[in-house]
Image: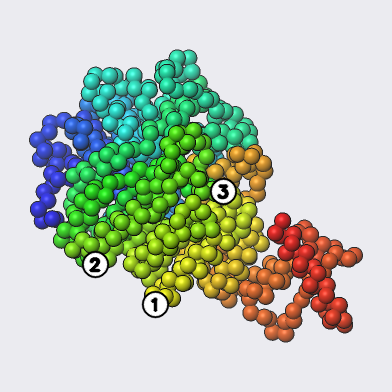
Amino acid sequence: MKNELRLSDWLPTTNKEVKIRGWDELDVILFSGDAYVDHPSFGPSVIGRIIEDCGLRIAIVPQPNVNDNLQDFVKLGKPNMFFAVTAGVMDSMVSNYTASKKQRDKDAYTPNGDKGFRPDYATTVYTKILKEKFPDVPIIIGGIEASLRRVTHYDYWSDQLMPNILSSSGADLLVYGMGEQPLREIIELMKKGVPFSSLKTIKQTAYLQSRSEVIQKNKNWEDVQIASHEDCLNDKKIFASNFKVIEQESNKTFGNRIIQHVADKRLVINPPFPTMTEAEIDASFDLPYTRLPHPKYSKRGPIPAFEMIKFSINIHRGCFGGCSFCTISAHQGKFIASRSKESIMKEVDTVANMPDFKGYFSDIGGPSANMYKMKGKVQSICDKCVAPSCINPVICSNLDTSHKPLTDIYQSVDKHPKVKKSFIGSGIRYDMLVPEFNKNADPKELEEYTEEVITNHVSGRLKVAPEHTSDPVLKLMRKPSFSNFHQFKKMFDKINLRKKLNLQLIPYFISSHPASELEDMANLAAETKDMGFKLEQVQGFTPTPMTVATVIYYSGYHPYTLKKMKTPKTKKEKEDQHRFFFWYKPENQKWIRNTLKKVGRNDLIERLLPKEEGYKKEAFKQDVGSKSNKKGFVSVLPKDKNSTQRKKKKSVSEKKYKKKRRR
């Protein structure tokens, strides 16, 4: 396949490549923060192919240099219709920096993983340069960076509240979410001669206008006004209250138009499109991708993100989990858009016939691996729903959680003559496989799917994400109780033993999440140790725009209740929480012992750490004349002569302690 491709099979990136296609001019020029990989998993490539499919002449300028004479921004001249700008598949700040705000060593979307090819706040940087060079050409911004920054938002890396990205960048129109539907409508109207300035009622777009201008009417939309950017700057509680409206309107089948004032302008965010139909999402994946990086990178080294998904198949979009720290539903929506089996198998065949395919698929999945074909049983019920999650606090009784279509896809892929094995690399929602939690599903079907995955689609380790063990933290995360993980592990162990597979279960956890206390992390360490885990897959909470957890982190208020909430914010608080993950490292053990002693949690010391030399079991006691700590528990008793009395006091106080913790 690779030998048969010509340079013209990729979208042009230079004047020479434009001329190879026989074009004298371009209709659209797309600037991207990623290297150009012509693959359906890379958003800029999808947008480029959509524009091409609409009959326009499109070129891509990947990773333009912003540190020289800016030649990359003018080399292709001026497009007839508009410039398109995206930071790439990731928010540029997430791509460039870690949770501790340190610059990353690698950029996964750049050849050889080289860093420095994507500027901070790339969407804004690119747009400002283009506006300076071509002030009369309209600019449309999109991608996850623009999408999640479409309204007043907290920026973790500058530690400040920022206005919508239209105000910051000077762009003319913003496409949020997955851009195929709005982009096709924009192009269709412009081809009919509608001026760009009149594109005010296209769904899933946002724009700025003077507050003196009249808002264009749409008889099917109602308007909801949120607090102004200036009000948000003055009052964190007001900022928090905005988010509930934004999240709910973004996840409705039929949302309202959102209005926000910023300085002398009015931000208008039109409602989203309905979820893509099967035919629409198939059409997007069936476009003529080469599925390869542009040949210009052949001598620069592999692109890590491409190598990771090179032999993978994306079978759906969206996620109805609604986790409070995750941006997937904020960008892709909570309703699932699933491809047809025919479209999936067509792509499987294409990949299986690539010359360097060795018979193994790295992933057959999506944002959450096991949500394929899942939707409401009665659509009219979903149409009225405003809940940000379909499975929290319980699984909606209207949600069809059948795993049969998914099991059928797996088995069909493995029957392909050139496929030796297909793995599931995407995260699996283990809670949906636990009958005690997924009470609407057939337990036998859940066990069949679980057995199919564990037996045939795991390469040594199955990774799942319980995220925490504390019920209050999990409730805030919109995740189920950790007891469900215990149930899933029992199922995993049973299948593992029966099939003699010798697989490992690897749980992911997050530290420093809002509501997480130091003791919660100690409990997490103790409980996972008791289950036989030495944690490896761990991370610190990173505040990203457009999530509940980030709003709480900045404002100190929960956007739905407006109650105050505590979050670990200082460097020391975050480091301390993270250290509990690694209780087994000798350099952490003295600190852990001293920390837990201070809060009277000798029970956790005994569960986590080896006994000190000469260490004797110490006990709790009720507050009888002694000074209690802030948790309401006293420092441990000194050794007394009456050991029977000491044991009795310990027994009483530990029972009370555990009772209080349960409350």
Element under disc 2 = loop
| Residue 428, x across and y down, in percent | 42, 57
Q: At 14% from the left edge and 41% from the top edge, which residue is drawn? A: 17
Q: Is residue 415 visible?
A: yes
Within 10 Å of disc 1 (Cα), the crowding (few <14, some 14-19, many 20+) is few
Which-is-in-front pick, marks 1 and 2? 1
Query: Disc 1 versus disc 3: distance between alpha carbons?
Result: 35 Å
Label 2: which residue?
420
Query: Where on the picture, by quarter, is residue 139?
Result: top left
Query: Nearer the N terminus, badge 1 or badge 2?
Result: 2
Tags 3 and 2 touching, CB below 8 Å: no
Q: How far is mark 3 from mark 2, CA to CA?
A: 40 Å
Q: Are marks 1 and 3 in contact (CB under 8 Å)?
A: no
**Local SS, label 1:** loop
Secondary element type, mark 3: loop
Q: Earlier in the sequence, mark 3 or mark 2?
A: 3
- Which amino acid, by three-letter code, is at mark 1? Lys
On the rendered image, what quadrant is the C terminus found in?
bottom right
Residue 574 vertical position relative to residue 328 in the rendered view, above or below: below
Position in image of residue 560 (x %, y %): 60, 39
Q: Answer with mark 1 or mark 3, whichever residue precedes in sequence.
A: 3
Tell me where residue 458 appears, x and y as whole percent: 36, 66
Residue at x 34%, y 19% (from the top left corner): 198
Please state which amino acid type lies under the numbered disc 2: Lys
Quadrant into which the N terminus falls:
bottom left
Check disc 3 and give the amino acid type: Pro
Could you tell me if residue 157 is visible in this image?
Answer: no
Q: Which residue is mark 3?
A: 393
> Can you say whether 414 is above or below 44 in the image?
below
* Distance in Å between CA atoms under marks 1 and 2: 20 Å
